[in-house]
Image (cartoon, rainbow, N blue to C red):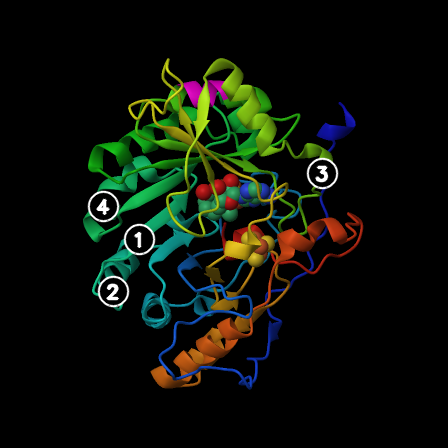
Amino acid sequence: MTDRHVPRVIPLTDQRSSSLPIPPIMADSAIGSGALLTDRRGRPLRDLRISVTDRCNFRCNYCMPKEIFDKDHTYLKHTDLLSFEEITRVARIFVAHGVQKIRLTGGEPLLRKNIERLIEQLSSLRTADGQTLDLTLTTNGSLLARKAHDLKSAGLQRVTVSLDGLDDAVFRSMNDVDFPVAAVLDGIEAAREVGLGPIKINMVVKRGTNEHQILPMARRFKGTGMVLRFIEYMDVGATNGWRMNEVLPSSEVVKLIHAQLPLVQLEPANPGETAERWGFADVHGRHDHAAGEIGVISSVTQAFCGECNRARLSTEGQLYLCLFAGQGYDLRQLIRAQSTDADLTTGVERIWRARVDRYSELRSALPFDPGSPVRRIEMSYIGG
Ligand code: SAM
Ligand code: SF4
Ligand code: SF4
C-alpha cells in the first residue's frame, strides 16, 4: 500500500451548533431601499443551495470517510431540521432578493422523506419578474431509478448526478459501501427518460485514485446531451485528510482529454458560472454541437470567488456564505422566534451585505496543517 492509499482522516470538530451574530446595519447600507442586494465585493445573490439532510447511504472517502461517519456519529434530530414549510418560507425571501436558482443537496437529498412535497412547494415560487426558478438537485444517483418519475412530476427541472468512474471496482471503492455503478447508470437513464435534463454528471478527480477513469467517462458521455464536469478534489471540511498532491489540476484533465478527443474552449453560459466549458471539436476544429461539451471546475487551482453569488442553507437552517466557512448565521432561530417576514428579510439583507468571503483566493496564503482541528464545516452538512 502506497502512502497515498493509507486512510488519513481527521477527527470531526462539531461546528454545527455555533453560529455568528447577524451583522449590524452598516453606514453605507441600502437596506429597504429596493436596491439590488450585493455583498461587500459587489457580488449579487443569485444561487441558493439547500441541504435537506446530513445523512447519506454512501461513504465517499473525500466527503464522509467511514472512519468518522460510523455508527457512533450523531446526526441531527428530525426536530432540528428545517421543515419543508420553513425551507420554502426562507427560499421565498431569497428569491425576492434575486435568487434565480435553487439546488437541493445534502448528504443525499433523496433520503429525505417526501422530498417531492418540498419540490412541489419550491416549484411554485416565482422570481420578481415572474419567471420560474431553475430548480435542480444533486444526487449520488442510488435512488434515482426509483424516484425520477415522481421528482419530475413534482416540478423538478433537472438533476446533477455524481459519478466518479465507470469501472465498477473503482466506483465501489470510492463510495466505500460497495454500491454498484450499474445502479447509478440506471438512475441516470431513468432521469433522462422522464426529461430531468439537461443532466450534468459530476466527477471528483483524485490523483492516484480515479484519474484513469477520465477518458472512459469523457467517451461515455460525449454525444449524449449530458454535460460531464470534472471537479478538483477540494479541501472542504476537515475530516478527509486532504493533501494538495492528490489534486489533479483541471488543466491536466483538459490536456489528457484533448490529446484523444480534441476540444475547443467555449464562452461561459452565465455570469458566476463555476465550470470552464470545453466543447468537443469537429474535424475543422470548431465546436461540434452534437458531440456536446465537458466542464472543469478548478476550485483549487483557479479561484472564482470574484464571481461567487451563492449562499448555502444547512439542514438545520444555518446560512453559510462560503463553502469553506467555519460558522453560519442561525436563520432557524429567527424563524422559530416568530419573526415576521420583514424581520427575516432584514436579517438576510444584513448578512449578505456584510459578506466578504473569498476562501479560495486566500487558500494559498493559509497554512494547512492536517493534524490540527480545522474549524470548517463538512460538505455533507452544507452540501456541494
Ligand atoms: N450526495 C449528493 C451527491 O453526492 O451528489 C449531494 C451532496 S455531495 C456533498 C455534492 C457534491 O459534492 C458531489 O458532487 C460530490 O462529489 C462533491 N464533493 C464532496 N466532497 C468533495 C470534495 N472534497 N471535493 C470536491 N467535491 C466534493
Ligand atoms: Fe454522500 Fe454525496 Fe458525500 Fe458521497 S459526496 S458521501 S454521496 S454526500
Ligand atoms: Fe465562493 Fe467561498 Fe468558493 Fe470563493 S471559496 S468561490 S467565496 S464558496
Q: For label 2, count other residues whose C-alpha is less than 10 Å away and answer few (under 14), some (14-19) or many (20+).
A: some
Left or right of 53 on screen, residue 212 = right
- Nearer to me, 352 or 57: 352
Marks 1 and 3: CB-CB under 8 Å? no
Q: Amino acid at mark 3?
A: Met
Left or right of 263 on screen, residue 186 = left
Task: Name the element at disc 3.
Answer: helix
Mark 4 vs 3, N-terminal side: 4
Task: Name the element at disc 2.
Answer: loop
In the drawing, what numbered circle is on residue 76?
Answer: none
Q: Amino acid at mark 1?
A: Leu
Start-end of magenta stretch: 215-219
**Is residue 7 at all visible to an observer of this figure?**
no
Q: Amino acid at mark 2?
A: Leu
Residue 326 forms part of the magenta stretch: no
- Residue on which the image places disc 1: 135
- Residue on which the image places disc 4: 152
Task: Name the element at disc 1.
Answer: strand
Frontmost of labels 4 and 1 is 1
Marks 4 and 1: CB-CB under 8 Å? no
Marks 1 and 2: CB-CB under 8 Å? no
- Residue on which the image places disc 2: 125
Q: Amino acid at mark 4?
A: Lys
Q: Quadrant of residue 24?
A: bottom right
- Residue on which the image places disc 3: 244
Mark 1 vs 2, N-terminal side: 2
Mark 4 vs 2, N-terminal side: 2
Q: Could you tell me residue 12's position as x and y percent?
A: 68, 55
Q: Quadrant of residue 228?
A: top left
Q: Could you tell me residue 332's position as x and y percent?
A: 46, 74
Residue at the image position 45 percent from the left and 75 percent from the top: 348
State the predominant SS element of the stretch in magenta. Answer: helix
